[in-house]
Image (cartoon, rainbow, N blue to C red):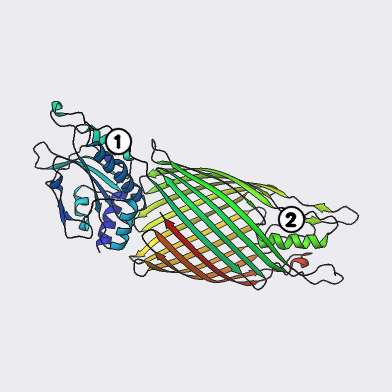
Amino acid sequence: MRLLRNSFAILLGLVFGVAGSRAATTVAFTSFELNKFGSDESVKLDDFAGSIVVLDFFAYWCVPCRKVSSDLEEYVQKFYTAKGGNAAGFPVQVVSMNIEQGRAAKTRQYINQTGMSLVLDDVGGKVYQSLNGRGIPYVVVLTETAGGSQWEDSYSHAGYEGYEKVREVIDSIRPDNPQAIRQLDKPIPSVAIPSAHGLEIGTDGLWANDIFLTDTTATHVFTRGVTEFRTSYSYSTIGLEYDPAEEAFVFWRQPTNISERRQTLQEAIRHTFSDWPSLTLNGALGGYDGYQDYRSVWLNEFYRQEYPDDYIEAEPWGVNVGIGLRWELAPTTGFLQFDYAWQKDEIAPGYEKKPFEPLARGRDDLDTHTVRVMLENVLTPSLRSQITGLVMDTTGRELRYGGQASLNWALAESWVLRSTVGYSEEAPRFEAWFVDETLEMDIDEQWYFSLTGRWYTDTGEIDDSLLLSSAAPELETWHIGLGIRWQGANSAVKLSGGPYFTRYGALGPYAEPFHNLYRGRDWGVAQLAFTHQF
């Protein structure tokens, strides 16, 4: 019930104006007394008489709160402690106010990750409500009134305008007597920019009776201040038993075992502008060497055997560049993101032999331009939505349009439902739909159990220009998976897996040689992931 009350109060704030900030509107009150988090020891606001107090209202489930809490601890608390107070000599104290008491382990993990030094339990959000809380993160700067018997807010803001704004407010606070302003003996401290490292390792396996695929990815995450670098390396394998379809008077096609490798290196950068804290710039650069999927390997072997004299060995590779901008429309609740990406691929081409004409080799290079627009909204503390639209332009093809809508819904304290539905189309006659549902249960605040279901269908690839078209027919797939995840303070491990089924429709005319490629398969899927933050 406490979670529902707090959520309702925050929702009202979101509806009736979460984005406002107030300067010295003088919400005055005598004081408050609250217990420290996880302790019976109490702290009074009056314990900080003569100081400037910065209140940081947060909850463990508030993702934007994490940056606010980290910044206030590093760039406000440590800064003014080293400096000896603001320019007028007032000491500064940051007090973190926890408005969610339902999940102590989750809150403790949040505290460890953000480095907060003084955390009080605002039970029922009473102090939050008395200060006209209108959403979190919510930052309030308090000073004593002239008589010293009450406190008033010199600044309050739902959302986050950056630590520079908070320091500007703090430095503007002066005593009533200008002669009392003193110059601090201590120089302005040089506060180290906080940095953190993270490691993510994941490995996937996908297998059928004639195909075995693996993918292992290691990612190093380095965060320094407002900039994040993600460096990823992937090593993938493709193993398949090539089994050509039997046709009358065709004796040159022979079964064989094929093994291929692919390596991928990707760098992603994210930077939040300090002057415009609502803007974040994203960039990406990467490349790969090797076959992208088992279908390309299968078709390449088919053409190698079909036209051995004029076949040219394929050497697929690709590079990509991307740039994007994320804009915080409404503080902590609304985001608009625009991304552009360019991908160049050297692929294994197809071949065609017409009577009395030389062998024709298909296109072996593709350029793809993708534009994506994403709108994300935090509708309530327990409900988050995301809508994405994209347009893709690939060499030799019509424009492909697509979109998807996602909803992340906390059904109860221990249950979360993630739903996604998507659609794409390409002229003249390609359409695809997919639905993805994941239900996750929190067992004991460290162990999580999940159930996943996925469904996908399309009308089949657009036939290529070759007489012997290798375009895939219509397709329908299903997947159901089970997963278990352990979440520690700085580490997490997840294991998941389940069956995966594919069913193709009838092949078109002259496509009999590809019967064994486009036949229904029952797959097994297994995934293992590990993350750690240093």
Q: Residue at x 56, y 44 (%)?
A: 322
Q: Which residue is drawn at 36% across and 65% down?
A: 411
Residue placed most toward the observer, 496 or 423:
496
Residue type of the residue flagged with mark 1: Pro
Task: Describe the element under mark 2 as helix, strand or loop.
Answer: loop
- Residue located beneath label 1 in the image: 189
- Residue sitting farthest toward the front: 186
Q: Which sits earlier in the primary sequence, circle 1 or circle 2? A: 1
Q: Please tell me the numbered disc located at residue 534.
A: none
Task: Describe the element under mark 1 as helix, strand or loop.
Answer: loop
On the picture, is 154 further left or further right than 263?
left
Residue type of the residue flagged with mark 2: Asp
On the picture, is 413 further left or further right than 311?
left
Label 1 packing within 10 angstroms: few (<14), some (14-19), many (20+): few
Q: Give the CA separation, mark 1 to mark 2.
A: 66 Å
Give coordinates of residue 480: x percent, y percent.
Answer: 52, 71
- Residue located beneath label 2 in the image: 464
Give coordinates of residue 402: x percent, y percent.
Answer: 56, 53
